[in-house]
Image (tube, grey):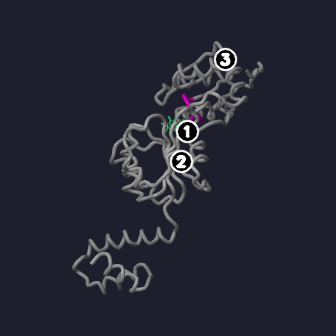
Amino acid sequence: MLKISNISLQSGLYIVSTPIGNLKDITVRALSILKNCDLIGCEDTRVTKKLLSSYEIKSKKLISIHEHSKEQKLIFLIEKIKEGKSIALVSDAGTPIISDPGLKLIILAINNGINITPIPGPSAVTASLVGSGLSSDKFFFIGFLPNKKNKRINALNEYKKVNSLLIFYESAKRIKETLIDMFSIFGNRRCVIARELTKYYETFYRGDLNKFKNIKNNLKGEITIIIEPPKNEKNKEKSDIDDEIKKIISFIEKKLSTKDLSKLLSIIYKKPKKFFYTKLIKTIR
Ligand code: SAM
């Protein structure tokens, strides 16, 4: 096994990424920080103990930190750093803060002039992105959607027009409902479901939302969903105009002839009357 030496760490807060499944996915620097720091702030102490013991890092003081941790607990950690101690912040898996707790502690540390050092490493966002095979020029990380259906639909509507890949974290229990909602809001976009990355059952499911909306609710494990951006600008503009036309029509239906309506739309959208007339005749009237 790799020997991690004893070193003296500068006091401060170290934000340490840990594996997202496979315990071997940890950097030498992360192990060195975990071995040599004075204290570790973590989520579930049992999860962190398991990681430490697999690298023979013994007798570490662990303090659990979660979203609702009392301010006093955070202040206690800040005071320790001010006394010259080094504290590592980890989460149960991956990179702390990425859909995980710890931000309050970091803000408090910054406000107290404390040195912050990120120790980069695994995250389900980057692992799923690079394995997806989708163009990763631009991506928009969303994390978890709200659990309640109406809030989830509202959130998806907000992201509908974002012109980059969308990356969501989702629980296996909700995957079916979420994919159905995604199909109803985004239409039939390409989608990649990354399951159990870095673990024994690692699987990438690739296809269109249309196919996945029929998925059985029996996927197990950790899941990340990646959705392709809306089609090119031309198609996007066309479907935006279609939506707008439908709205206007439902408003003034029967009050205007198709010809007059085409004229009106051509003024609003600065496009030829014929464009709208054909569309109205074909699809709506
Ligand atoms: N901080 C972590 C990170 O950097 O990826 C994420 C923590 S968040 C509480 C946990 C969610 O991340 C899971 O519900 C799942 O959506 C995603 N996730 C974590 N591990 C994963 C894995 N091995 N494969 C696929 N998705 C994973």
Dot 1 or dot 3, earlier in sequence: 3
Q: Position of residue 25 (x, y in %)?
A: 64, 32
Describe the element under mark 3 as helix, strand or loop.
Answer: loop
For residue 141, the mark is: 2
Describe residue 158's horizontal placement relative to residue 232 as left or right: left
Describe the element under mark 1 as helix, strand or loop.
Answer: loop
Does any atom of ligand 1 lie closer than 8 Å to the CB of label 1? yes
For residue 98, the mark is: 1
Whether 177 is drawn above or below 58: the answer is below
Relative depth, front residue between 221 and 74: 221
Badges 3 and 2: C-beta atoms under 8 Å apart?
no
Residue to which mark 3 is pinned: 57
Q: Which residues are magenta?
A: 91-96
Q: Quadrant of residue 254?
A: bottom left
Badges 2 and 1: C-beta atoms under 8 Å apart?
yes
Describe residue 89's horizontal placement relative to residue 196 as left or right: right
Q: Position of residue 116 (x, y in %)?
A: 67, 33
Residue drawn 64% across and 26% down?
88
Q: Nearer the viewer, mark 1 or mark 3?
A: 3
Judge whether residue 176 is colored magenta.
no
Whether 86 is drawn above or below 138: the answer is above
Dot 2 or dot 1, earlier in sequence: 1
| C-alpha gap between disc 1 and disc 3 | 25 Å
Dot 3 or dot 2, earlier in sequence: 3
* Badge 2 density bin: few <14, some 14–19, many ≥20, Cα 10 Å: some
Q: Which residue is the extreme one toward the left?
A: 254
| C-alpha gap between disc 3 and disc 2 | 33 Å
Residue drawn 60% across and 22% down?
51
Q: Is most of the magenta stretch helix, strand or loop? A: loop
Describe residue 8's horizontal placement relative to residue 252 as left or right: right
